[in-house]
Image: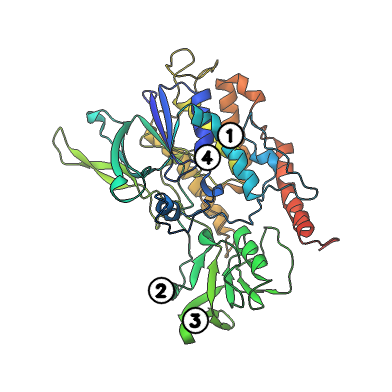
Amino acid sequence: MATSPRRVLIIGGGPCGLVTLRNLLERGEFEDVQLVERRDNIGGVWYQSRNEHANDDSDPLAASRSRWPTPAYPALIGNVIPEFLSLSGYPFPTPPREGQPFPTLRETYDYIAAFARPLFERGKIRLHHEVVDVAEIEAEDGGGWRVAMTDWSKGSGSGVSLKEERWDAVVITTVWYDNAYYPDVEGLDDVKLTGRVLHAQTWRGPSGYEGKHVVIIGNANSANEMAAQLVPVAQLPVYRSTRRVSIFPSLPDDCIEDVGPVSRYSRGANGKITVHLQDRTIDDVDYVLFGTGYYPDVPYLRVLGPAVGTSDRARRSLDRLTHRHIQPIRVPSLYRHVLYAHNTSLAFIGALISFTPFAMADLTSTWLALAWSSPAGTGTGTGTRTGSKVTVPPTVASRLADEQDRLQILHQLRSETDNPSDLVSFHFLGRYELPYAQVARAEIVRAAPELGDVLAPWDDAQDARRFAMYATKLDSLYVLAGKTGEP
């Protein structure tokens, strides 16, 4: 990166965006850093508006609330203990319950809101601003990024305005949760038209499913929680279609019947769905609920492609960087899952899937703040660093080598089994997460030694505590269910 950006825009007001804002402001050297969020409050997937599905003409912001629903639901309890939800320098409070150390949706949101309060007070967060286009600018035209956004602050209709701004650098934190992933299975597109196919993205609890015949697809956290919540109200058994044994904790329940993978779907009688398994069919299904995760896509982002023409002013086309059909599924051309290799003034925080996403976003955004900042004493921002700068490989080819190394590892991992898990994916590092974090942390501490006592340690002891969360979560599920003893 030839120069350090002076002005940085962060897109997305969830935990990733907020900790990035804090870290760029306090650990970097920049002239201006701002964050825009399209909804009426910060929190990302942890914020659930009181009127999320309301259609209230008396509330001019009701439309914007329902436009972007969160995957969160009122009864949600997390799967990460406070240690790994704590952003550096701001510990997460211990939940006030015995046997249930995992915070609720409200407790997590309250923590995020408190963390964001001083950022609001500094005037660094703009709500109701939906980014609709981010376009890379030619170097001959000064470089940087042209950002178009819709201002919904006055509600819909005549109050909506479109504005355009120019920024030296952009951080995108809205990578996953707008993009519900459905497996490619025969007949699925057709049965979606019945309105009986839903995704965990829009799950709000079991109300409305009384007496309904339900098949759930998947057995990770979302699928398991939907199944457990449906048991008291739905027609039994609740079917759960899986491809392998889950690594995610869930209570055994005779009312949940695990079945094999779905080979195809078809329309049944009375507008219902027939689910065809490899060895049987399930008829008269009222709803098929998918807990199959999300895929990375940023549809509003356009980057410069190869030059077109042979003149001195040959122009380059603007093309989408991400889309649904990239294989392996990923945000392409990233160095360390963070920096866009072809133009390092574009960054992604939250593209990397972590066992401990708050802690990982804190680490990677601190790394980014130092990678983008001028050496100590030469910046014009408000940072207070005393060290040097994190270095990034100087050429596009050297930065792209990181992606190629990861693709080779991913190919090896997927070739080791004929039924690879969806968790064996480009941005999910698995057993490579700790080494990744240790390298990033070491580079940070070399550049800013004072952060050595502030950041999470990312050592073997921490990793052991993280693995122990699975057993702790299972124990907490027994406590919630009022059960004791071994499963």
Q: Nearer the viewer, mark 4 or mark 1?
A: 1
Q: Position of residue 439 (x, y in %)?
A: 58, 32
Residue picked out by circle 1:
115
Q: Secondary structure at mark 4?
A: helix
Q: Is residue 213 left or right of residue 153?
A: right
Q: Is residue 152 left or right of residue 290?
A: left
174 or 467, nearer to the observer: 174
Q: Can you say which quadrant of the picture contains the N terminus?
A: top left
The reply to whether the C-beta atoms of the residues labelled 4 and 1 are less than 8 Å apart is no
Q: Report the Cα–Cα distance between label 2 and label 1.
A: 42 Å
Between label 3 and label 1, give the one nearer the viewer.
Answer: 1
In primary-sequence order, the first of circles 2 and 3 is: 2
| Residue at disc 1, secondary structure | helix
| Disc 3 to disc 1, C-alpha distance | 47 Å
Tag 2: amino acid? Leu
Displayed quadrant of residue 483: bottom right
Q: Nearer the viewer, residue 196 or 350?
A: 196
**For the C terminus, which image quadrant?**
bottom right
Label ID, residue 193? 2
Q: Nearer the viewer, residue 412 or 146?
A: 146
Mark 4, residue position: 16
Disc 4 packing (10 Å; few <14; some 14–19; many ≥20)? many
Locate residue 8, reporting x and y percent: 40, 30
Q: Residues within 10 Å of mark 3 (few under 14, many from 20)?
A: some
Q: Quadrant of residue 267?
A: bottom left
In this figure, which residue is indicated by the disc labeled 3? 272
Distance, label 4 to label 1, CA atoms, is: 12 Å
Q: Nearer the viewer, residue 24 or 440?
A: 24
* Residue in the picture at 76% in, 54% down: 476
Give how far apart the Cα atoms at labels 2 and 4 are.
Answer: 35 Å
Q: Residue furthest front?
A: 58
Q: Is residue 16 left or right of residue 433?
A: left
